[in-house]
Image (spheres, rainbow, N blue to C red):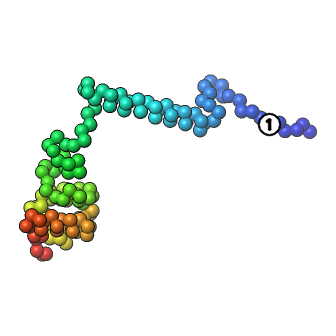
Amino acid sequence: MPSPRARTPQPVKGRRSQGTSAAGGASQRMARLASAARDSVRGAVAGAGTGGVSVSPLPPDGRNAGDVLHPDSGHSDLPADLSKPARRSLDDAGYTTLQQVSQVSESDLARLHGVGPKAIGQLRTALAAAGLPFAAKR
C-alpha cells in the first residue's frame, strides 16, 4: 500500500492568487481600504485652506463646544451638562427652554425616556438659579 503523501494546495484555475489563504487575502483587502481611507482624510485636512474640510475648535457664535445645540432646537438655556438622552427627550417633547420646563411637573418629566433622577436634579438646580419652580403635581 502506498504511503500517504502531504498534498500541497493547487491554485484554482481562472483565479488570481490572493496570498496564502482566504483570510490572508481578506486582510490584504482591509489594509488597502484602510490605507485609502487614511489618504482620503489626509487629503481633506491638507486641503482645508483651499476649500477642503474646515474644523473649528469652537462654534462661531462664541459658545463652548459642549453647548452646541440640536440644529432644530433653536436657543436653549437648559443645563450644558445635561446628558444627551435627556436633552433629546426634552427636545422631542418640545421642551427647549427652562421656561417651558417650568410648566411641567417633575413626575411628568421623569416619565420621559432618558430623563432620570440625575437630569431632574440638574433641571431643578437650573430652574432655582433662574428663579423658576417646577409646575405643581396634577
* Coordinates of residue 59 in the picture (x, y in percent): 19, 43
* Coordinates of residue 4 in the picture (x, y in percent): 84, 38
* Coordinates of residue 62 in the picture (x, y in percent): 15, 44
Q: Residue at x 26, y 59 (%)?
A: 83
Question: Horizontal placement of 9 versus 132: left or right?
Answer: right
Q: Amino acid at mark 1?
A: Ala
* In this view, 26 is above or below 99: above
**Is residue 50 shown to the viewer in this render?**
yes
Image quarter of residue 60: top left
Q: Which residue is mark 1?
A: 6
* In this view, 99 is above or below 1: below
Question: Horizontal placement of 65 versus 8: left or right?
Answer: left
Q: Secondary structure at mark 1?
A: loop
Image quarter of residue 93: bottom left
* Coordinates of residue 2 in the picture (x, y in percent): 90, 37
Q: Quadrant of the C terminus?
A: bottom left
* In this view, 50 is above or below 132: above
Q: Quadrant of the N terminus?
A: top right
Image quarter of residue 13: top right
Q: Residue at x 21, y 68 (%)?
A: 121
